Image (tube, grey):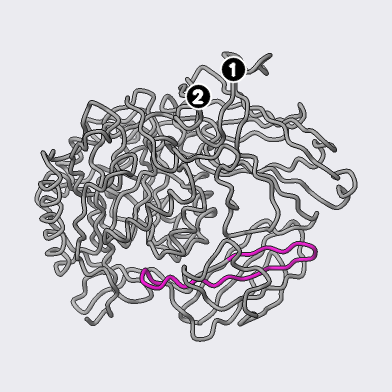
């Protein structure tokens, strides 16, 4: 495989890796970024290595070029990380303080040691975790050691598109630390989590502040701001005075009135920033006044609505892979580039495909006005491609759906795997539900590890009644959720409107074109190959015309596959290295909002 670098990867500064505050929905002023150069070692046994193999650049997985390693962690191996960090003056201020160590994501299972003492163990390669290390640290130098195990696609754990034997629609497996590692000092009684739920009908927002014990809380909400007004310092004391100030207690709901609310839309993504003070702790957060729903138009056709108005959601599939960082974007600027270019290309929605991004990616979608469909990360046993890829395509076209009780066919036999999926689905919603840009939760994709779809839809609805649910994207539809969700790469596009669920084409296109000098593989995978960029753009234009013709017939959203090339799959709008934009046609699908009567 040829190594391709992005412009951000080529300009990477090892001393300043993804230094932006990693948790935008709960921001404190002071924190310690632990990204950068660590030591690493591969071992056959779960035993601390006597010596390390070399240096690795965290948070890039060892399989990525930017890590400096370029080595696959195999299921029978362990990967060890080591670094030191200094604490100055800790002995003087330790009383009444806590030190929290955060990991954005470690794939797949890990154990954390501080100064030789085990402090945490975690399984779940896509979700963050934290551990209090107050009692394990000392004044001066401290050692941080992490042991990682990754079974990849040999087990039922969540894995997304990773595969040890990559090829076609599945990509290089990766492992280890792949999101920011950071540390922050907090008061003993501190704010653990904030949830803000807008209510457009009442003109209020309900804010919950979670802490260990019930404490008095003061909340100051400032005037709304657009992206052009938002900086990394948004929410500091130089901001205009509050438009509303309310008080209450943590671990209970505090309701605040939002008079004449500025609504969040793709064209004007207004955000309300607010400060929460609880004792010695003070944090910043934000919310938006907006709603997503499925409502019937004047013809009785269910439509996707933003703030009660019909919005055709013209989307693009984004797998979140980078040619040099794999799962990890080389910089914050790289993430912003993708989202802005999506909007420039005419998309107002992005489907984040079987991956959970760092929270800063969602923050940029929030502030830039990009609607998000968020997939749950798939897992389960080895997929039966003859069914979930080939036979299912034909069956879906004929509107024939297999029941999800056939867990053997859908690679979900293990009870432990089912329980883990439910647990991680709940954690995903809890982690991301505060981001205003998220419109849809996608529970299953193409039957990959699918099971008990109706039960999981009910769980999702209870966790977050404010979002739309796509219960089964592609095929194996069980009739639930809010969307009739179809993938169609090979047949004539059509729509079958239902009485209650909105009709969406949740994957279409996938047109391929190899841009010489910007492809990673000799092999080519995709749908409908093209000999020139001109031919590719003509095909894309024709496809979008067909999509547009289906909108009056009931089509509510479409998702083009995909945003960038990835390894063998060269069906991207951009090349894998983000150097060449292969498709420059802007689809004109009327993606703005309309009243239901229009």
Residue 159 badge: none
Instruction: Give the x, y percent position of residue 553.
Output: 14, 67
Q: Looking at the image, do the residues carrying marks 1 and 2 touch, with CB atoms under 8 Å apart?
A: no
Q: Percent position (x, y) of residue 190?
A: 74, 58
Q: Is residue 31 magenta?
A: no
Read off the residue under disc 1.
Answer: 53
First to last magenta residue range: 265-285
Which secondary structure, mark 1? Answer: loop
The answer to whether 369 is drawn above or below residue 22 in the figure is below
Pointer 2 local density, CA inside 10 Å: few below 14, some 14–19, many at least 20: some
Q: Position of residue 135 (x, y in %)?
A: 82, 39
- Residue sitting nearer the eye, 39 or 133: 39
Q: Residues within 10 Å of mark 1 (few under 14, many from 20)?
A: few
Main SS, magenta region, reads strand
Q: Could you tell me how many numbered marks the image carries?
A: 2
Q: Is residue 283 magenta?
A: yes
Decide: is 548 above or below 134. below
The residue under the point 48% across, 74% down is: 289
In which quadrant is the N terminus drawn? top left
Location of residue 557 (image quadrant) = bottom left
Quick one: 298 or 162, which is closer to the camera? 162
For this view, does 545 lie left or right of residue 66?
Answer: left
Answer left or right for 48 relative to 585.
Answer: right
Splitting the image into 4 quarters, where does residue 246 fall? bottom right
Q: Quick one: 362 or 252, which is closer to the camera?
A: 362
Dot 2 lies on which element?
loop
Q: Which residue is mark 2?
A: 69
Q: From the image, which quarter does the C terminus lie in?
A: bottom left
Gap in angstroms between the C-alphas marked 1 and 2 = 10 Å
- The x and y percentages for residue 47 are 66, 16
With 117 as the anchor, is 539 left or right in this view? left
């Amino acid at each position: 495989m040829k190594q391709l670098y992005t412009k951000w990867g080529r300009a990477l500064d090892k001393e300043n890796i993804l230094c932006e505050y990693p948790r935008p929905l709960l921001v404190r002023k002071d924190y310690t970024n632990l990204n950068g150069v660590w030591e690493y070692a591969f071992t056959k046994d779960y035993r601390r290595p006597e010596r390390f193999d070399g240096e690795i650049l965290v948070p890039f997985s060892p399989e990525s070029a930017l890590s400096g390693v370029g080595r696959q962690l195999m299921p029978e191996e362990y990967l060890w990380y080591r670094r030191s960090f200094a604490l100055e003056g800790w002995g003087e201020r330790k009383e009444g303080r806590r030190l929290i160590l955060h990991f954005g994501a470690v794939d797949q299972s890990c154990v954390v040691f501080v100064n030789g003492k085990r402090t945490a163990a975690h399984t779940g390669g896509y979700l963050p975790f934290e551990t209090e290390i107050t009692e394990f640290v000392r004044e001066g130098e401290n050692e941080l050691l992490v042991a990682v195990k990754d079974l990849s696609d040999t087990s039922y754990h969540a894995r997304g598109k990773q595969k040890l034997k990559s090829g076609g629609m599945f990509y290089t497996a990766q492992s280890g630390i792949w999101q920011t590692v950071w540390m922050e000092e907090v008061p003993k009684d501190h704010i653990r989590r904030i949830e803000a739920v807008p209510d457009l009908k009442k003109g209020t927002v309900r804010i919950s502040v979670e802490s260990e014990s019930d404490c008095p809380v003061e909340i100051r909400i400032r005037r709304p701001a657009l992206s052009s007004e938002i900086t990394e310092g948004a929410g500091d004391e130089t901001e205009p005075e509050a438009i509303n100030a309310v008080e209450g207690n943590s671990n209970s709901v505090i309701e605040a009135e939002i008079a004449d609310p500025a609504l969040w839309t793709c064209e004007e993504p207004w955000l309300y920033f607010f400060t929460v003070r609880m004792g010695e702790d003070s944090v910043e957060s934000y919310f938006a006044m907006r709603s997503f729903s499925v409502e019937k138009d004047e013809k009785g056709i269910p439509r996707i609505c933003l703030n009660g108005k019909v919005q055709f959601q013209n989307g693009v599939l984004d797998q979140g892979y980078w040619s040099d960082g794999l799962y990890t974007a080389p910089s914050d600027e790289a993430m912003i580039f993708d989202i802005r270019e999506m909007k420039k290309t005419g998309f107002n929605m992005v489907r984040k495909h079987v991956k959970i991004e760092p929270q800063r990616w969602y923050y940029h979608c929030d502030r830039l006005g990009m609607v998000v469909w968020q997939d749950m990360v798939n897992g389960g046993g080895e997929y039966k491609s003859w069914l979930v890829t080939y036979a299912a395509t034909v069956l879906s076209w004929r509107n024939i759906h297999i029941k999800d009780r056939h867990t053997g066919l859908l690679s979900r036999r293990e009870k432990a795997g089912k329980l883990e999926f439910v647990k991680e689905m709940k954690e995903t919603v809890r982690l991301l539900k505060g981001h205003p840009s998220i419109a849809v939760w996608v529970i299953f994709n193409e039957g990959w590890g699918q099971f008990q779809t109706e039960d999981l839809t009910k769980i999702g609805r209870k966790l977050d009644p404010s979002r739309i649910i796509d219960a089964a994207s592609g095929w194996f539809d069980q009739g639930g959720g809010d969307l009739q969700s179809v993938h169609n790469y090979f047949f004539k596009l059509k729509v079958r409107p239902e009485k209650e669920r909105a009709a969406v084409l949740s994957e279409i296109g996938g047109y391929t074109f190899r841009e010489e000098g910007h492809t990673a593989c000799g092999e080519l995978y995709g749908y409908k190959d093209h000999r020139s960029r001109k031919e590719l753009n003509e095909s894309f234009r024709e496809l979008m015309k067909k999509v547009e013709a289906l909108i009056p017939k009931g089509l509510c959203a479409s998702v083009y596959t995909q945003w960038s090339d990835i390894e063998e799959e060269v069906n991207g709008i951009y090349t894998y290295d983000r150097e060449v934009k292969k498709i420059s046609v802007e689809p004109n699908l009327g993606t703005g909002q309309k009243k239901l009567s229009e």
